[in-house]
Amino acid sequence: MNILLTRPLIDAEDLMGKLFSLGHKIIHIPTLKISKASIDPADAKKYDAFIFTSANAIRNLKLINNDKNMTCFCVGSITEKIVRQAGYNNTISAGGTVNALKNIILNSDKVDKNYVRRMIDNYFIIFFIKVSNFF
């Protein structure tokens, strides 16, 4: 089968390898370019957990007062791998779907569930959540 992948190479390499090993012909035409947002660094001490919905979130995260023991919820195994490579050691992978990620977060004792539900209802993609002062 011929398969067209449009993600940037850094995000498509693992999938390309898997598909190629299954005998597929891979055509890679990256149509997206991921670039850093021009924002001030976030103060990690203001947050009780991070939620990463893509490997690009961790690659482009700017923090002050970083805490490598922070709980990190990751959408999938690739994102979790990048988070661990960045030095975080308290990671939880949701297996690759946003719904699984939502359920893992809502069933965690690390966050205020009511606050998270409001955030998830209002915003589909969340990079980190402020949960302190909501208990």
Image: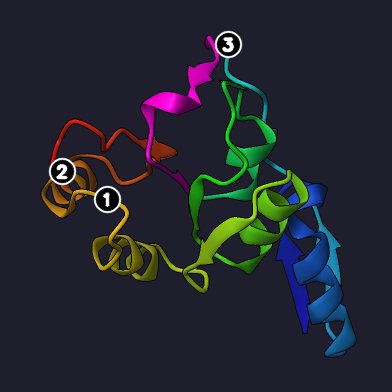
For residue 19, which numbered disc appears in the image?
Answer: none
- Label 1, residues with CA under 10 Å away: few <14, some 14-19, many ≥20: many
Question: Which numbered disc covers residue 115?
Answer: 2
The kind of secondary structure element at disc 1 is loop
Residue located 60% across and 29% down the image: 61
Of the image marks 3 and 2, the number of the one nearer the N terminus: 3
**Magenta segment: does it hold 100?**
no
Q: Earlier in the sequence, mark 1 or mark 3?
A: 3
**Left or right of 6 on screen, residue 45:** left
42 sits left or right of 32 in the view = left
Q: Which residue is mark 1?
A: 111
Task: Tell me the amino acid under the disc marked 1.
Answer: Val
Residue drawn at (80%, 49%), measured in percent from left and top? 10
Residue range highlighted in magenta:
39-52
Position above or below: 70 against 64: below
Pointer 3: what residue? 38
- Check disc 2: other Cα within 10 Å, few if <14, some if 14-19, many if 20+: some
Query: Given contact means CB atoms under 8 Å apart, are the residues at marks 1 and 2 in contact?
Result: yes
| 92 w.r.t. 9: above or below | below
The kind of secondary structure element at disc 3 is: loop
Between 19 and 104, the one lying in front of the other is 104
Nearest to viewer (mark 1 / mark 3): 1
- Residue type pointed to by label 2: Tyr
- In space, the residues marked 1 and 3 are separated at their CA atoms by 28 Å
